Image (spheres, rainbow, N blue to C red):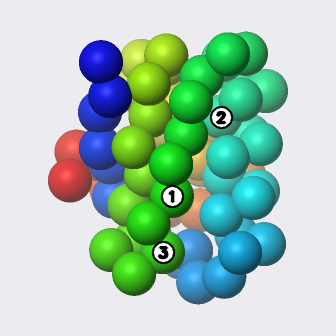
């Protein structure tokens, strides 16, 4: 099941790649889809706490469920 979260500070493909890599490093096998326009991510295969820690570790602001 996929969950969608708001991530503040993402503005380019590099940002999207950084967030995706951080989540996949924290939860191998997780599927991440980034929507830069909506500043959101959809994640399947990782719980909210793991996603939050990964996003913040990559230097972005995790703003919770979208």
| Crowdedness near tag 3: few (<14), some (14–19) or many (≥20) residues, C-alpha within 10 Å | some
Task: Give the residue pinned by disc 1.
Answer: 34
Task: Give the residue pinned by disc 3.
Answer: 36
Residue 60: percent from the left, percent from the top?
59, 62
- For the residue pair 46 and 64, the one nearer the viewer reads as 46
Q: Is residue 19 visible?
A: yes
Q: Is residue 17 above or below residue 55?
A: below
Residue 12: percent from the left, percent from the top?
66, 82
Question: Residue at (56%, 30%) from the top-left corner?
Answer: 31
Report helix, strand or loop for mark 2: helix
Q: Nearer the viewer, mark 2 or mark 1?
A: 1
Mark number displayed over residue 23: 2
Mark number displayed over residue 51: none
| Crowdedness near tag 2: few (<14), some (14–19) or many (≥20) residues, C-alpha within 10 Å | many
Q: Which tag, 2 or 1, sits closer to the chain's start?
A: 2
Residue 8: percent from the left, percent from the top?
44, 70
User: Pointers 3 and 2 in contact (CB under 8 A)?
Assistant: no
Q: Disc 2 to disc 1, how far (Cα)? A: 12 Å
Residue 64: percent from the left, percent from the top?
28, 47
Report helix, strand or loop for mark 3: loop
Question: Residue at (73%, 15%) from the top-left corner?
Answer: 28
User: Pointers 1 and 3 in contact (CB under 8 A)?
Assistant: yes
Q: Dividing the image into 4 quarters, which one contains the N terminus?
A: top left
Q: Is residue 44 left or right of residue 16?
A: left
Q: Is residue 56 above or below residue 53?
A: below
């Amino acid at each position: 099941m996929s969950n969608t979260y708001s991530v503040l500070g993402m503005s380019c493909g590099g940002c999207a790649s950084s967030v995706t890599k951080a989540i996949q490093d924290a939860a191998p096998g997780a599927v991440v889809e980034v929507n830069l326009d909506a500043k959101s991510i959809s994640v399947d295969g990782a719980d909210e706490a793991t996603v939050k820690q990964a996003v913040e570790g990559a230097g972005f602001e995790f703003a919770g469920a979208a």
